[in-house]
Image (tube, helix red, strand yellow):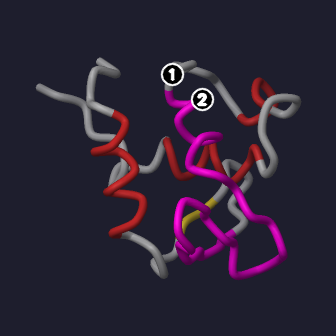
Amino acid sequence: MYDTPFDEIWNRIVSHAGEPFSTKTGLQFTYRIEGNRLCLNSNTYRISKNDFEKVYRMLPINGPGEIGEIVRGPSYVWAILHDARIFREKR
């Protein structure tokens, strides 16, 4: 189920920069990409591509609480990786 190469996932993340996303609790946010970092437009968080890859390799997870000690901005990382535009199951 999670066999999509991470580079493809990252390319999807990059291609959807500027679009609205929502956290699990409904907080809307947007982001931009600067090199290998995702920068949230609503605050000063910068989240590395490596952090997204680390969490992607852990999937499935139930919520951001499971990665709170692993990455910065776990609510945002979880929301992006679980969004249908980014993660698409193969059928």
Where residue 57 is drawn, which disc sits there? Answer: 1
Rendered-image quadrant of the C terminus: top left
Using residue 3 as the reference point, say whether residue 50 is left or right of it. Answer: right
* Residue occupying the point 60% across, 30% down: 55
Q: Is residue 84 magenta?
A: no
Viewer-nearest residue: 86 or 55: 55
For label 2, the crowd category at 10 Å Cα-Cα, with few meaning under 14, some 14 to 19 and many 20 or more, is some
Q: Is residue 84 above or below residue 89?
A: below
x 69%, y 72%: residue: 40
Q: Hey, which quadrant is residue 39 in on the image? A: bottom right
Q: Quadrant of the N terminus?
A: top left
Which residue carries the number 2 mark?
Answer: 54
Disc 1 + disc 2, Cβ < 8 Å: yes
Give the amino acid at mark 2.
Lys
The CA distance from mark 1 to mark 2 is 5 Å
- Mark 1: secondary structure: loop
- Tell me the kind of residue under disc 1: Arg
Q: In the image, 82: left or right of 71?
A: left
- Numbered-mark total: 2
Q: Which residues are magenta?
A: 28-56
Residue 76, x across and y down, in percent: 68, 54
Residue 21 x, y percent position in the rendering: 54, 66
**Residue 34 x, y percent position in the rendering:** 56, 74
**Residue 54 within the segment the image draws in magenta:** yes
Q: Examine the rendered structure and indicate whether residue 4 appears above or below residue 33.
A: above
